């Protein structure tokens, strides 16, 4: 029995290791459906006084749009239906507009918070960690509530998303429990009192809302992020492409980038040498970091520059 | 008779144009392509420096002119003998030649964004210039995503 469960969890680990990058890979394509939401440059600052305005900013900071929008021509943003083809079957991302039967129209705020911060669906079953709830778990209750307010303010879109179509044995969600027991820490973000407010804001944005580590941190054999190599690059990123080391290592990371290099890149997509990288970061910039305030981009840079430089080659 | 002459002349000019296009050795074609891309990146890097270091802001329009003048060349630098199988030092993916229409759409987007950026660079304030520069960058990155090995 024990051997069986170990084998099962290894298989699931394998699945997750393959899936997580694939799911993150969708990042680049949401350009068209995101357009309607992304007009207007920098969005309301986090201190905006309405929950809906704050929630829209959280939507960007948390990078929700890409995965929850279909690539089909004319598809409505956030109505789900992006088909993620994997060797194990096809995942279909959910509709998160407030449609009564096809979206989250019947969800309570409690349901929403539990999904984001605990990785559990309304019926209590665990989500596949392709949904980056292991990062979102640290989201503040305030931010999660504001995000819910924003999503509730959207037009409901009637878009029925099919169930995931996974092959045996990956269709067994029960097997996710042992994985969660091993790797899921649902503790909320704890600011470090020895660090500046800016650093703490950056840590929160990078590790929780922005879920940068989902692609930039390598994964272990069980598909969990290898936190000892936090943000040190991932040789097996989305679509099998390597994802760069973003620790401040001189040769292999971003040690030779100054603060303006980092913030300008996150705002526009241009690397210090004038090149524009492909590989998925595009849509992160288009749907997420390109909308953040200068203060938040500076906070992200401050946090990244404080990390221990690691020499991992990652993917350059 | 005149129509026939025109027809023959047209065919000849097309043939000679193609002859020029495939005359380069794979290595030469790839190196020229990379130089064109580097020139675009060079001007983009200069614009980035201007914005980041707040130097010579009045130069931006001229860099934008250079990018707009160079962007149309990007559709002519993919001769059939410059595929990955022809010369290993190219990062271009074979998909470029396998799906020419989809690739052409990306090139057209670059040309449009380069013209739009030039228009904004000539008169826009810094916020507008950065926003248009980001759009231009998205057209570069969107194509690199699909058609360049990273």
Image (spheres, grey):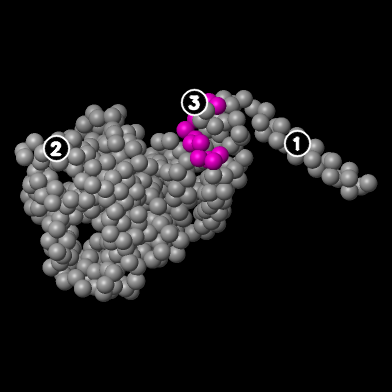
Q: Which mark is residue A7?
A: 2
- Determine the secondary structure under disc 2: helix
Residue A55's image quarter? bottom left
Mark earlier in primary sequence (3, 1): 1
The foreground one among B122 and A211 is A211
Please state the horizontal and vertical placement of residue A50, each as a whole percent of the image. 23, 72
- Determine the secondary structure under disc 1: helix
Mark closer to the observer (1, 2): 2
Kindly report the distance in space between the C-alpha atoms of the residues bearing marks 1 and 2.
63 Å
Q: Is residue B27 above or below residue A81?
A: above
Q: Which residues are magenta?
A: B86-98
Q: Badges 3 and 1: C-beta atoms under 8 Å apart?
A: no
Mark closer to the observer (2, 3): 2
**Chain of the residue where label 1 is placed in the rendered structure:** B
Kindly report the distance in space between the C-alpha atoms of the residues bearing marks 3 and 1.
28 Å
Q: What secondary structure do most residues of the magenta stretch adopt?
A: loop
- Whether callout 1 and callout 2 share a subunit is answered no
Res A3 seen here: yes
Quadrant showing the C terminus of chain B = top left
Please state the horizontal and vertical placement of residue B94, each as a whole percent of the image. 51, 36
The foreground one among B43 and A191 is A191
Identify the residue shown where x is 55% and y is 54%: B112
Identify the residue shown where x is 16% and y is 38%: A10
Identify the residue shown where x is 45% and y is 54%: B135
Q: Which residue is mark 3?
A: B88
**Chain of the residue where label 2 is placed in the rendered structure:** A
The foreground one among A244 and A49 is A244
- Determine the secondary structure under disc 3: loop
Identify the residue shown where x is 18% and y is 35%: A221
Q: Which residue is mark 1?
A: B15
Q: Badges 2 and 3: C-beta atoms under 8 Å apart?
A: no
């Amino acid at each position: 029995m024990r051997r069986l469960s170990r084998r099962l969890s290894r298989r699931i680990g394998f699945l997750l290791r393959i899936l997580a990058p694939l799911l993150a890979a969708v990042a680049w394509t949401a350009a068209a459906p995101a357009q309607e939401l992304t007009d207007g440059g920098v969005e309301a600052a986090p201190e905006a006084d309405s929950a809906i305005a704050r929630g829209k900013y959280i939507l960007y900071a948390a990078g929700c749009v890409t995965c929850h929008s279909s690539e089909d021509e004319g598809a409505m943003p956030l109505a789900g239906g992006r088909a993620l083809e994997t060797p194990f079957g096809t995942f279909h991302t959910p509709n998160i507009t407030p449609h009564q039967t096809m979206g989250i129209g019947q969800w309570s705020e409690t349901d929403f918070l539990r999904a984001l911060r605990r990785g559990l669906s309304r019926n209590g079953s665990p989500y596949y960690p392709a949904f980056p709830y292991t990062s979102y778990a640290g989201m503040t209750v305030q931010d999660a509530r504001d995000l819910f307010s924003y999503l509730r303010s959207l037009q409901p879109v009637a878009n029925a998303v099919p169930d995931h179509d996974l092959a045996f044995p990956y269709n067994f969600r029960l097997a996710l429990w042992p994985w969660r027991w091993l790797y899921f820490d649902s503790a909320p973000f704890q600011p470090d009192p020895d660090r500046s407010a800016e650093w703490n804001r950056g840590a929160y944005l990078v590790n929780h809302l922005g879920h940068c580590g989902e692609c930039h941190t390598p994964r272990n054999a069980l598909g969990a992020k290898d936190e000892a190599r936090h943000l040190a690059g991932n040789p097996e990123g989305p679509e099998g492409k390597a994802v760069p080391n973003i620790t401040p290592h001189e040769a292999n990371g971003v040690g030779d980038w100054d603060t303006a290099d980092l913030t300008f890149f996150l705002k526009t997509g241009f690397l210090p040498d004038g090149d524009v990288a492909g590989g998925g970061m595009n849509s992160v910039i288009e749907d997420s970091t390109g909308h953040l305030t200068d203060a938040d981009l500076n906070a992200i840079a401050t946090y990244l520059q404080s990390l221990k430089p690691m020499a991992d080659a990652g993917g350059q | 008779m005149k129509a026939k002459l025109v027809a023959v002349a047209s065919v000849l000019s097309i043939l000679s144009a193609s002859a020029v296009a495939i005359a380069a050795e794979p290595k030469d074609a790839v190196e020229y392509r990379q130089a064109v891309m580097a020139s675009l990146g060079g001007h983009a890097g200069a614009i980035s420096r201007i914005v980041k270091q707040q130097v010579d802001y009045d130069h931006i329009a001229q860099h934008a002119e250079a990018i707009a003048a160079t962007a149309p060349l990007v559709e002519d630098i993919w001769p059939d003998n410059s595929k990955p199988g022809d010369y290993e030092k190219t990062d271009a993916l074979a998909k470029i030649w396998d799906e020419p229409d989809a690739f052409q759409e990306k090139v057209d987007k670059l040309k449009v964004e380069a013209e739009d950026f030039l228009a904004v660079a000539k008169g826009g304030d810094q916020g507008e210039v950065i926003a248009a520069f980001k759009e231009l960058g998205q057209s570069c990155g969107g194509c690199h995503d699909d058609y360049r090995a990273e």
